[in-house]
Image (cartoon, rainbow, N blue to C red):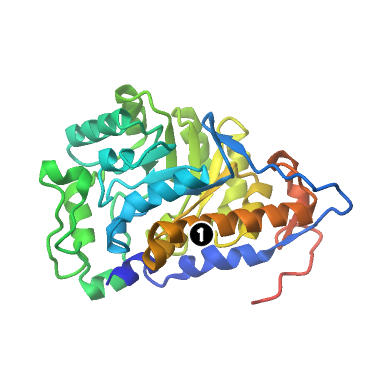
Amino acid sequence: MVYDYYASGAEDQWTLHENRFAFTKILFRPRILIDVSKIDMTTTVLGFKISMPIMIAPTAMQKMAHPEGEYATARAASAAGTIMTLSSWATSSVEEVASTGPGIRFFQLYVYKDRNVVAQLVRRAERAGFKAIALTVDTPRLGRREADIKNRFTLPPFLTLKNFEGLDLGKMDKADDSGLASYVAGQIDRSLSWKDVKWLQTITTLPILVKGVLTAEDARIAVEAGAAGIIVSNHGARQLDYVPATIMALEEVVKAAQGRVPVFLDGGVRRGTDVFKALALGASGIFIGRPVVFSLAAEGEAGVRKVLSMLREEFELTMALSGCRSLKEITRDHIMTEWDSPHPRPAPRL
């Protein structure tokens, strides 16, 4: 049940496959004979300096993967010098995660029907030292995840959604289909709209990242609405099936943002080469989700540290072999895609 929850996507899982496969349609145009004896991967995100443009996406209920759950992830992110995003539906609270020690952390927010719950949660995240809100905008209803329906997914009895424990919203009822889908139907606000992005800015001074943008139209509206950044995301292919892979939607969103806000990507990143491709298409950084929960399940904090260090080393090697010494040297000219003209040979099918 737990593995299926983490691994699966919506309906036919076409987008789940495509999130990965689309990266194979992008090839490198490496530049040679450049002194790459020193490589600088550091960057700043919303003014915060991090060691690399590889960050941790919000994934729910991490104690299902490992007893230390979000605590372990937070420590691994901090040790790697990067940002962790904590899910609203974490099995550890904002205060508990803050107690693991220093680190730059963002808080992913679902907007509940009860706005007092939302305001309270945002205030708690602020007090706990979280530096930004990642507002998930692609989930007015939960996508149809058939593995969860088959398994009658529910949060294991020894766990709670820790951020909501005191509000009687921390438990998930058993259901004939997915317990999470029923929870979302009961609690999450389907009326969420752009005016709520404005409202959120009245209750917090934290920068707001709009997570779940896939089109130029919405990118432009997000900028106008005062978003501090955009995360191109299809929710790990768990919401609407047959949306494009995020790496395919990225360039459209980057062009629409016109450099006014940073654009980030999540979905399908499994290699340092993928990170480079996203940056070449204009992303300011990427977030990883499933690699975190799978490494957490395998080896706890050490597993998450290892996944971050593997991606870091692969990305550094890709930069060196492409002739890039810093992130600003990574350009669109370092890649070619199937949709560029004239027609380059497509990537070999793996």
Q: How crowded is mark 1: few (under 14 residues within 10 Å), some or many (20 or more)?
A: some
Residue highlighted by disc 1:
306
Please give the count of numbered marks on the rendered protein.
1
Q: Position of residue 218 (x, y in %)?
A: 48, 41
Residue 255 found in image quarter: top right
Which residue is rendered at x = 76% and y = 44% of the image?
38
Which residue is rendered at x = 46% and y = 47% of the image?
77
Which residue is rendered at x = 29% and y = 44% of the image?
110
Relative to the observer, which residue lies in front, 30 or 14?
30
Relative to the observer, which residue lies in front, 111 or 293?
293
In the displayed orientation, state which residue is furthest to the right. 33
- Lateral position of residue 186 relative to residue 21, left or right: left
Residue 279 sits above or below residue 116 on the image: below
Q: Tag 1's secondary structure?
A: helix
Relative to the observer, which residue lies in front, 237 or 161?
161
Q: Position of residue 119 (x, y in %)?
A: 23, 31
Q: Where is residue 164 in the image (x, y as percent from the top left)?
A: 18, 44
In the displayed orientation, state which residue is furthest to the left. 168
Residue 2 sits above or below residue 102 on the image: below
Image quadrant holding the N terminus, namely bottom left
